Amino acid sequence: MYPKALMHYMMWLEVMMSTGGVKLGSTYDEARTRKVNAEAEIAELELAKIKGVLVVAEDVVKAWEDVLGAFKGKLLSLPSKAAPIVSAELEAGMCQKILEDLVAEALTELSNYDPKVDATTAAVIEPTSEEGDGDIKSAAKTKRKPVGRPKKTTRLANK
């Protein structure tokens, strides 16, 4: 009889540990268990985001939009870069070599492309003052004076 009681006690402890000490059976207890489980799942997601294992889908989309936009710009600029150089060549082999060099140059530039999105902070990275706009001054202060002619005063007629 003792081993059977011990087994029941161990099962009861297991149930209590899995539900956070709440007895199962009532709807309140079930709701509370779901809430605790949801909060634990949110905490795990936040931890994964902090560790850099999880990224926000919006940030991934933004980064890819930036990369693909840069790629599109490079491809669209190739004809205007290549036209003056290729027009002077008479041999097809030289034209092909020039185009291959321009494509390789564009791909090299794109391989070093750095989208300005940091996936771990879910924000766009702003350039620091060292990178530019170090000499920009703020606008002049306003004087806060009314503009235009003064308001008309109404005269009361003494009748």
Image (cartoon, grey):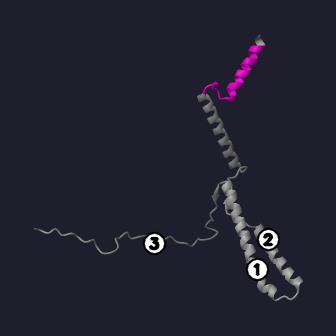
The spot of residue 34 in percent (x, y) is: 64, 34
For marks 2 and 1, the one nearer the N-term is: 1
Residue at 60%, 28% (x, y): give it.
Answer: 27
Q: In terms of image quadrants, where is residue 90?
A: bottom right
Mark 3 residue element? loop
- Dot 3 crowding, Cα within 10 Å, few <14, some 14–19, many 20+: few
Question: Which label is found at residue 79?
Answer: 1
88 and 140: which is toward the camera? 88
Q: Nearer the viewer, mark 3 or mark 2?
A: 2
Residue assigned mark 2? 107
Q: Quadrant of the C terminus?
A: bottom left
Q: Which residue reaches farthest left? A: 159
Residue 52 vs 1, above or below: the answer is below
The spot of residue 148 in percent (x, y) is: 33, 75
Q: Which amino acid does label 3 sit on?
A: Ala
- Dot 2 crowding, Cα within 10 Å, few <14, some 14–19, many 20+: some
Q: What residue type is labelled 2?
A: Leu
Q: Which of marks 1 and 3 is in front?
A: 1
Answer left or right for 120 relative to 82. left
Mark 2 residue element? helix
The stretch in magenta equals 3-26
Residue assigned mark 3? 140
Residue at 63%, 26% (x, y): give it.
Answer: 22
